[in-house]
Amino acid sequence: MDNNLLGEQIAQYRKAAGLTQDELGKAVGISAQAVSRWECGGAPDITLLPDIAERLGVSIDALFGREKGEQADVEDTVRRWIASVPKGQRLNELCRLVWSAMGPVVLLEGRDYKTAPKFNRESRCEWIDEADGKPYPVLRRISVFQEDGLVFGVNADDMSFVSIWPEPEAGYEAFMTKNSLCRELFQVLAMPHCLELLEYLHSKPARDFRHYTPGAVAKALGIEVQETENLIAALTDLGLLKPATLETEDGVCHSFRTWGYDAIVPLLYFARWLTSGGTPPTTTAGRTAPVLRREKWKENEED
């Protein structure tokens, strides 16, 4: 699909309506420069599409090349819209789309979707103390507890994400790891210089899949080689690092590399989420069932 289809359609219908870019922009509350960017390959915020279509006198489908009234396919429409957004902006715009659609998720039963709450976007994800003007590590965040799942997220210009957890039929606990493995992971992460080692490894280009020797990493971190080897062994046992060997002119050299994924980033961010005191998250609670439903606790209570 031509990624500029949406921009081309907007330009076509704008001209047919006899509107300038400035006039269309004012009608939907943005600048003429923004309209120009759309028509040259950019994409409007998806929440603006209804206003754009109404001002141009066409349907949203028509903006995506469906002039003949084919039945709307929501998934295809979203895919077309995302494809029209420049690559470097797609994840951020997708996140904004999810937030804009979140209201009906928490809507009370029996209420019209038009009354659904809106999750306003903040400029910063940190809380600023009005008394001294200093930022504190207290995140403006959302926790949504529904009968059919959980949602966590931050909706701010400087940091945003949405983590959606529909509840499995078997419950979350059926897919959780054993407590013993969690304890082992946290014990390893608590080892001196372990987090610094992970930060160092993830500061390198993700696609390099480069190999590291304990000596090279020890030098970069300013610690002893033996300490580095102990950290590597512990992280390898947990599956966080992959062991490898290099054959050199001096013989076989032991090395290691990362697996190439960055799950450590959300893990450490959620650690901050959990431990940042002060202002609590904005919470929408529509759930009465416990988050975990492990039978062993029920059995203990009955006993």
Image: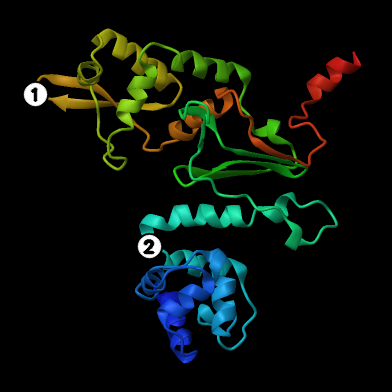
Question: In the shown orientation, is residue 14 left or right of residue 292?
Answer: left
Q: Quadrant of the C terminus?
A: top right
Q: Which residue is mark 2?
A: 86
Is residue 278 shown to the viewer in this render? Answer: yes
Q: Nearer the viewer, residue 136 or 143?
A: 136
Give the amino acid at mark 2.
Answer: Pro
Task: Name the spot of residue 107 as percent of width and height, x first.
Answer: 76, 52
Q: Measuring 44% from the left and 33% from the top, which residue is drawn there?
A: 265
Q: Quadrant of the N terminus?
A: bottom left
The first of marks 2 and 1 along the sequence is 2
Determine whether the residue tagged by mark 2 lies in a helix, strand or loop. loop
Task: Name the spot of residue 281 as percent of width and height, x first.
Answer: 63, 34
Mark 2 nearby-residue class (10 Å; few <14, some 14–19, many ≥20) = some
Q: Nearer the viewer, residue 131 or 161?
A: 131
Q: Nearer the viewer, residue 107 or 222?
A: 107
The numbered disc on residue 249 is 1
Question: In the shown orientation, is residue 229 left or right of residue 4?
Answer: left
The numbered disc on residue 120 is none
Cα separation between marks 2 and 1:
48 Å
Mark 1 nearby-residue class (10 Å; few <14, some 14–19, many ≥20) = few
Q: Measuring 54% from the left and 68% from the top, which residue is drawn there?
A: 48
Q: Nearer the viewer, residue 8 or 233?
A: 8
Task: Name the spot of residue 81 as percent of width and height, x first.
Answer: 49, 68
15 to 48, vertically: above or below: below
Determine whether the residue tagged by mark 1 lies in a helix, strand or loop. loop
Which of the 4 image quarters holds residue 171?
A: top right
